[in-house]
Each structure stands twice: as C-alpha cells, then as structure tokens.
Amino acid sequence: MIKTNQNGQILVVVFVALGVVLFTVLFIIGGAQVYFQNSNYSFLAEKANVLAEAGVDKAIASLNQTGGSYNGESRTTLGDGEYSVSIISTDAATKVIESTGFVPNKLQPKVKRTIKITTSRGVGVAFNYGLQVGEGGLELGNSNIVNGSIYSNGNIVAGSSNTITGDVWVAGGPQPIADQQTDCIGVNCQDFFFGKNTFRVSRASSLQAAEY
C-alpha cells in the first residue's frame, strides 16, 4: 500500500496562506501610514502657504499705509504658525516682497513655504482713508461716524460721541494729546493707531502687486 504525506502538504499550504495574508495586512497598514503622512504634510504645507500669503497681504497694506517705508518683519505669529517678511527695493518705484510661512514656528519648522512678488507704485490715485484732508485740518461736530481711517495734514478738532473705525493720523506739528477713547480690545489693537503724530504729509500714491 502506498501512503502519501497529506498532513505535511496541508501544513505547507497553511503556511503559504498565512504568509499571503500577513503580507497583505502589512501592505495595507504600510500604505495607510504613507497616505496619512502625505495627507498630514499636505495639510501643513497648505497652512504654511496661507501664512506666506498673509505676510504678502500685510506687507502690501503696510507699504501703502506708511508711504513705502515698511521694511518687513520677523517671526510674526498667526494661527498655528509664524511668517517672516523681507523687503528689497530694486528702484525708487519697485520693491520685491518675500514672505515665508513656517509651521509650527521658524526655529523648528516642519513645513515652510515662500512666496516672492514684485510690487510697483501705482499710476492712479489711491485713496486709503475714510477721510483725508489738507493743511486746513478737520473739525467734527457731535455723533459722527467715520467708517475708515482719518489722515489730516492739519489739526483735528472733534466734539463728543464721534466714532472712527480706523486709525487717526495728524501730519506735522507737536505731538497731539489723545483725549478720546478707543474701544479696540485684544492683540489686533497693535495694528490701530489713535492720535498718532507723523511728520509726513500724506499724498495719493500706492503700491500694487506687479507679478508673482
């Protein structure tokens, strides 16, 4: 009588099946881990890109607000990261803005993205204030509302219960006494000025993005 070793054959088949199952499970787990890492990196990269864009927007707004004297900033915290901005003047009317976003911070970034644009002084008239007056100054009565900033090349005299939603600038003369109140609350107040004295006379010019 001829006998075959069926038990041994079955054991080999079981080992092969277990090997296939184990390989499949490891492949699925490894693929899921790679997918998760790539998704997380893409998510952080998008955050860094948004931070860099925020730096560009802040730079353009600051250049327009300061008449082009804004020189950039470093490690400004915004949301879940930081951004830094550098300004390079190529000529009297053109500036290069380079903004880099870092997540979670500049010292130990997991992801960083940089945006560089060229800005040029606009040829049209830019009106950046809710109210802009010349050397004659401004006199407000009572209970007026100004939606925006005020820039005056002369004195500003105001009555009671006036509301100004932006900044208040007075060009030239001695440092004014801010005898009014502001209801700005929180960290965003550092971007608003009230009763600010400046020795620059405002003129109608602006900077705009020329190209990316």
Image (cartoon, rainbow, N blue to C red):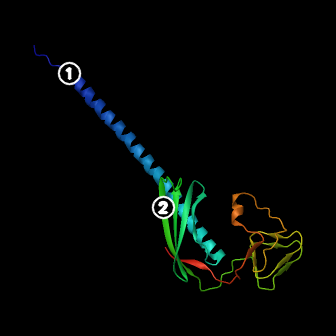
Which residue: 35% across, 37% down? 26
Q: Is residue 11 left or right of residue 186?
A: left
- Examine the rendered structure and indicate whether residue 90 appears above or below residue 29: below
Residue topped by disc 2? 113
Please state which of residues 196 and 44 is positioned toward the viewer in this rendering: 196
What type is the residue that disc 2 sits on?
A: Arg
The tag on residue 8 is 1
- Badge 2 local density, few (<14 within 10 Å), some, or many (20+)? many
- Examine the rendered structure and indicate whether residue 6 appears above or below residue 38: above
Q: Residue furthest top?
A: 1
**Residue 153: horizontal and vertical position, in percent?**
76, 82
- Examine the rendered structure and indicate whether residue 24 appears above or below residue 59: above
What type is the residue that disc 1 sits on?
A: Gly
Q: Which SS class for mark 1?
A: helix
Please state which of residues 165 and 87 is positioned toward the viewer in this rendering: 87
Does label 2 or label 1 sit earlier along the sequence? 1
Q: Is residue 30 left or right of residue 160?
A: left
- Examine the rendered structure and indicate whether residue 149 appears above or below residue 154: above
- Badge 1 local density, few (<14 within 10 Å), some, or many (20+)? few
**Residue 5: horizontal and vertical position, in percent?**
17, 19
Answer with the quarter of the image where residue 169 lies: bottom right
Which residue: 49% across, 70% down? 116
Answer with the quarter of the image where residue 207 lies: bottom right
Gap between marks 2 and 1 measured at Cα: 60 Å
Q: Which SS class for mark 2?
A: strand
**Residue 186: horizontal and vertical position, in percent?**
72, 57
